[in-house]
Image (spheres, rainbow, N blue to C red):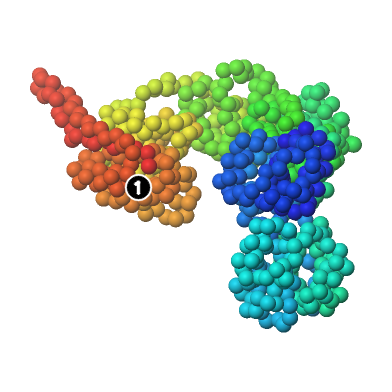
Amino acid sequence: MSKLLIFSGTSDGRILAEKLADAGHEITVCVATEYGGQVMPDNPAIKVHCGRMDEAHMNSFMSYSGMDAVIDATHPYAKKVSENIRRVCQMKKYQYYRLVRDSFSHMVEGDDIIFAEDALEAAKFVNTLDGNVFLSTGSKELAVYTENITDKERVYVRVLPNIKVLEEINKLGLSGSHIICMQGPFSEDLNYAMFQQINAKILVTKESGSAGGFMEKIAAARRAGMSIVLIRRPSESGYGLEDILRKFTSQKKMISIVGIGMGSVKNMTLEVKELCEKSELLIGADRMLSAVSFSAAARKVSLYKPEQIADVIDKAQESKIVIVLSGDVGFYSGAKKLIGELKSRGYNDISVHPGVSTVAYLASKVNVSWDDMVFVSLHGREQNIVNTIKYNQKVFVLLGGADSVACLCKLLADNGFSEVKIFIGSNLSYNNERIVSGTAKDFLSYHEEGVSAVILINDKVAMKSITYGIADEQFIRERVPMTKEEVRTVSLSKLQLKENSVVYDIGAGSGSVSVECALCMSDGKVYAIEHKDVALKLIERNCEKFGVSNVELVNAFAPEIDKDIDNKMLVPTHAFIGGSGGRLSQILDWLEQKNPHIRIVINAIALETVAEATAELKRRKIENPEIVSINIAKSKQIGGYSMMMANNPVYIFSFNL
């Protein structure tokens, strides 16, 4: 049994509520009017909520409803209401189903049909025609017609029998003889009788669908020789009535997500093979489906994107469904996103079955233990692999692409790790399996199609520093300004970096801040933004010296960065401003546009910069900014004495926008 929330504005909504309640589901129906609640079936499994709701009310209502799914059965023309329902469902991560009625407009096209996009356009058409007008478009937009049809005496309306509706119509100036209050749908004969009674020459209607008596209305109008103004239905995608009923009343779907190991049948577990053999529907990429070709009875669908897989499952008639993935579904697998997508659509009966992971397979083949190994995937992902290999003896890397191994080896060689031992496995478990070993410098031209895996062994592991503050003397400096060691240490502490932060180092100088940021973020990224060529060359040399590969140079005077480059830069989480060139206000505007919640640290030496930064804090109404003044003096040997030599005081501003 599921708890289902139905927003109803059509007779289809009433049908859904009744049939789904009879199928054992607990139903809550939201209707806009009391009349909508009165026509709902008298069933203890159906609760009815009356009253119009905007997006805020929907959000509040759904917060306490605890529903498994939401069905939008509102009127096809209630576009704003549907948008609100869909948006709230996305925020709440409820599975959302839009009920779409069959379209009949193509079946009624003719010389007597005038198509209009909305009520205003329909009213303008009516003004060009002669004779009495029969409006069957509901009461919601009635004011559009009374305001734009010159002679109101021509207008007759058919609406639901509702006192509030009648009061609103009277306010618009229509008399009782021009108002027909009845509940439909209506037969062709009854429609024809009404048209004859008021001598109607024009019918204005919407394409409401078969449940709304649309075809009978058109047939009666043509029989009476009337002109027809038809308001087009907004185009949308969704599910038909039978599709939704089938989904919630059919046999429960059992979904298994299985890992088939490297790909060969002999590499699969007996459990996975049995699940594939007994499945009714197999879904996976072509290579995966080829590997389980022994399951002849199952229907096979070649897909790998989570949303597309979930769409197929939504409409599937089969109950035993197996989704085939490579390797171990818990090791750099698409299973994580797939499970999230399926659960968001209400599928909770999901079982997960691992296969042999790539790391276990390759490690066993080269006789290397992997209990102390660090795992990295560069298959469609970015990571600071140089930093990882620098501080870990054993690293496993998953790669994709024919030249990916060569690119990795070149990166290692460029950063001083050309002698690192490497084991490379390609086409693992297949007949053309290839496993080779050597050092990184031996495979600068390695080329192999498909996914490859490597194990890197670094026998010269560095000890990672647990504090900031690389000595100034270790950096290549020349005559480019540099944030001094003690100031750098405090500034980096105030930045409050995370492992995966994205840092903009603005006015990067010699790159000391960029390097230290990069070294402490294994999954992070640093953009060193500097406009001086000599400084850019220094940053590049310092990055090479300290073996950091997650620093990208940006040759620009911030914020004047080439638009193409700017668009490709990752959204910053942090920014260090060591030099603003008098453009602090423009730089902060640019950063705020990039990320309104960015963490910023500014170093200021000149009093003019201090004044500019203080003014910006006030102008932007920054809450709880921190300003620290550092006065550093360092000892220097002069003769036989140690003299303290003072540096310029530095003001450190730290805050969140």
Quarter of the view holding residue 290: top right
Which residue is located at x 19 percent, y 26 percent?
634
Q: In this view of the protein, can residue 491 be seen by the observer?
A: yes
Q: Which residue is mark 1?
A: 588
Which residue is located at x 68 percent, y 37 percent?
67
Residue 390 or residue 313, whichever sits in front: 313
Which residue is located at x 29 percent, y 34 percent?
626
Count the marks: 1
Check disc 1 and report its element: helix, strand or loop. helix
Left of 219 or right of it: where is 381?
Answer: left
Residue 125 or residue 537, whichever sits in front: 125
Q: Please, is residue 505 above or below residue 275 in the view?
A: below
Q: Please, is residue 137 above or below residue 278 in the view?
A: below
Q: Position of residue 247 (x, y in %)?
A: 80, 41
Q: Position of residue 273 (x, y in %)?
A: 82, 27
Which residue appears farthest toward the right when viewing the image?
297
The quadrant the C terminus occupies is top left
The quadrant the N terminus occupies is top right
Quarter of the view holding residue 108: bottom right
Q: Please, is residue 105 above or below residue 611 in the view?
A: below
Q: Position of residue 150 (x, y in %)?
A: 63, 79
Left of 244 or right of it: where is 467?
Answer: left
Q: Position of residue 147 (x, y in %)?
A: 60, 72
Q: In this view of the protein, can residue 309 be seen by the observer?
A: no
Residue 603 or residue 437, whichever sits in front: 603
Crowding at dot 1, Cα within 10 Å, few <14 / some 14-19 / many 20+, comes out as many
